[in-house]
Every structure is written in C-alpha cells, then in structure tokens.
Image: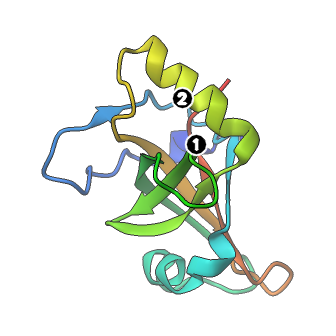
Amino acid sequence: MRGIGRWFRRAAIPSPTRLYEWSSTGRYPTAVVGESHYQDTLQAEAGDYDRSQGACKPCVVTLECEDDNPHDNFAVAVRLHDHRIGYLMRRDTEAYRRKLDRKGLGTRATVCDAIIIGGSFDKPSLGVWLDIDVS
C-alpha cells in the first residue's frame, strides 16, 4: 500500500471532539480484521465505484480501546462515523497500546487515515487498511 496516500487529501475528522491524530505516511501498513461483518457500512462509505476496478476510498477512522470487550480485553475497535467497521489484529493491539503509552495517551481514542479497498469482481468484500504503523 506504499505511496497511495500522496493522491488523497486528509479527510475532515468526523468527530466534533479533538482527538489525537496520528501522522499520515501514505503507506497504509496495518490491516483491519472483522470487516466482513460491517460490509453495509463500508459499502455506504465507498459509494459508487467501478466493480471491474474495485473501490479505493480514503477516509478517517477512530481507534478505540475496548477494555470491557468480552472476547478480548485488549481489543482495539476501528470506527467510521461512529460505526464499528472492525478491529486491529490481536497481534497489533499490544504494540498499538504501547504506542499510546509512549505518547502519554493512556487508552484515549485516536484518529488516523485509512483506505477502503476491494469490492471488485475478483475480491467482492471491502477491506480497510490503516495509515498507522503499530510497531
């Protein structure tokens, strides 16, 4: 996903509350998981696109620690306009939380650039990649 960010302007942060914004690199190295459960939300955000090419829609997402998640108390939810669209991979949550600690953010919600891709005839599901390196 390297270099794709240079074609997009940073979208406006969807929340009226000012959240910490991770710096944009344009690389999108971090995958979101569980997005297959949120295809309606992703489809609405991606809008109309050529199915032969697939979607390539930039957006801004919110990352929220879910300490009370019954399946994983270290879970980090990914939200788009207050709708959950997936989670960070389990292997990425520990590194992400360390990154929060290094910044002195605790478990505060943050925002980062993201890209919705897929939705083509070859790859019908939409996926999300984050412009944040959690390592």
Task: Pinpoint residue 84: horizontal percent, then vertical percent.
Answer: 46, 67
Task: Pinpoint residue 121: horizontal percent, then vertical percent.
Answer: 81, 87
Q: What residue sits 33% from the left and 51% below the top? A: 11
Quadrant of residue 104 in the image? top left
Q: Is residue 104 above or below residue 1?
A: above
Residue 82 visible in this rendered orientation of the protein: yes
Q: What residue sits 86% from the left and 81% below the top? A: 122
Task: Pinpoint residue 77: horizontal percent, then vertical percent.
Answer: 50, 55
Q: Residue furthest left?
A: 16
Q: What residue sits 64% from the left and 70% below the top? A: 35
The quarter of the image holding the N terminus is: top right
Q: Residues within 10 Å of mark 2 (few under 14, many from 20)?
A: many
* Numbered badge on residue 97: 2
Q: How is the image coloured?
A: rainbow
Q: What residue sits 33% from the left and 35% below the top? A: 108
Query: Which of these two is toward me, 88 or 124?
Result: 88
Q: Is residue 133 left or right of residue 103?
A: right
Task: Pinpoint residue 38: horizontal percent, then vertical percent.
Answer: 56, 78
Q: Nearer the viewer, mark 2 or mark 1?
A: 1
Q: Is residue 95 above or below residue 127?
A: above
* Numbered badge on residue 54: none
Quadrant of residue 14 in the image? bottom left
The quarter of the image holding the C terminus is: top right
Q: Residues within 10 Å of mark 1 (few under 14, many from 20)?
A: some
Q: Secondary structure at mark 2?
A: helix
Residue 2 visible in this rendered orientation of the protein: no
Query: Which of these two is toward me, 25 or 74?
Result: 74
Looking at the image, do the residues carrying marks 2 and 1 touch, with CB atoms under 8 Å apart? Answer: yes
Q: Which residue is mark 1?
A: 74
* Kind of residue indicated by mark 1: Phe
* Kind of residue indicated by mark 2: Arg
- What's the distance in space between the residues labelled 2 and 1, CA to CA? 8 Å
